[in-house]
Amino acid sequence: MKLITPYPNTNKYLYKDFYYWENSFNNSNTLFDGHFNNYKITIHSKIIYTGFLNSEKDILEHGFSVYPSTYSLLGFIQNIFLSTAFFTWFDTNYMDFCIPMDTFYNVITEVNNNNLINSNGIDLFKKSYEFLENLWILDENTIMDKLYKFCNSFNCNWNNDPYKKLFIKIFNSPEEIYPFVIESIGWDCEEFIEEEISMSTEIFKNTCNNVFSQPFINEKFIDILNSNMPTLF
């Protein structure tokens, strides 16, 4: 796969539009596990790790993906991740992992009409959507600060049941991934950690630290994460 350098998009509200994401999905662009639009990782890129578990439907999906900017990351979380998380958790008609291609409130209405849903769960998701909606007027640094807090709050609500989980984690730089992986594995034994990640911790740390300086690592970094990392939630 040949990666390309992201072209700076001055129209941040393009990423706010659901139909932009619908078109991206229809064009088979990677959304949950890869390089969005085949863009290289730059200093402006944001990496995201998402996880979905629903044992009743035999769903376990997780992966890393990279987006070219803060606004594209925000658009993905608001328009794709949140609807997919809601659908995975509450819908009982589809047994496979599904990305619902409809606006957030339409997804809520459709799922709610066909399933018995606790209103508290719907309210939590609506508050999440409204929180994200209010971020578009802010500068990029403030948005990232708010998104870090959003992820922590979301995980507190939806990452507690051992049989049913939703998880989201964002990274401002590739270097942030190393401590997250080591902490998530949760073992002090280096040998066990290396077995889990299929490489030495030294190589993994160097890989995370050299994404910008080594073109080959830049191209393969997300693939390495998705191929080597265990479930991290």
Image (cartoon, grey):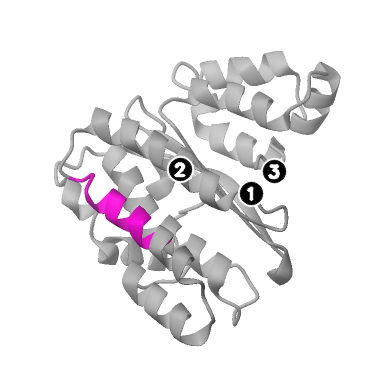
Res 23 visible: yes
Q: Earlier in the sequence, mark 2 or mark 3?
A: 2
Determine the main secondary structure of the stretch shown in magenta.
Answer: helix
Q: Do tag 1 and tag 2 residues touch (Cβ < 8 Å)? A: no
Q: Is residue 131 magenta?
A: yes
**In the image, is 54 to the left or to the right of 44?**
right
- List the residue tagged with mark 1: 160
Q: Earlier in the sequence, mark 1 or mark 3?
A: 1
Q: Residue 65 at what x, y percent from top left?
A: 49, 43
Q: Residue 15: percent from the left, percent from the top?
A: 25, 52
Crowding near the residue tagged with mark 1, few <14, some 14–19, many ≥20 C-alpha atoms within 10 Å: few
Report the residue marked by disc 2. 153
Q: For this rendering, which residue is in front, 104 or 207?
A: 104
Amino acid on which disc 1 is placed? Asn
Is 213 rendered above or below residue 181?
above
Residue at position x 75%, y 24% from top? 199
> Mark 1 or mark 3, which is nearer to you?
1
The residue stretch that appears in magenta: 125-136
Q: What's the mark number on residue 231?
A: 3
Sequence order check, earlier mark of 1 and 2: 2
* Crowding near the residue tagged with mark 2, few <14, some 14–19, many ≥20 C-alpha atoms within 10 Å: few
Q: Quadrant of residue 233?
A: top right
The amino acid type found where label 3 is placed reads: Thr
In the image, is 47 to the left or to the right of 69?
right
Task: Pinpoint residue 106: horizontal percent, then vertical percent.
Answer: 34, 76
Q: Residue at x 71, y 18 (%)?
A: 201
Q: Measure the alpha-carbon separation of dots 1 and 3.
A: 15 Å
Q: CA distance from mark 1 to mark 2?
A: 12 Å
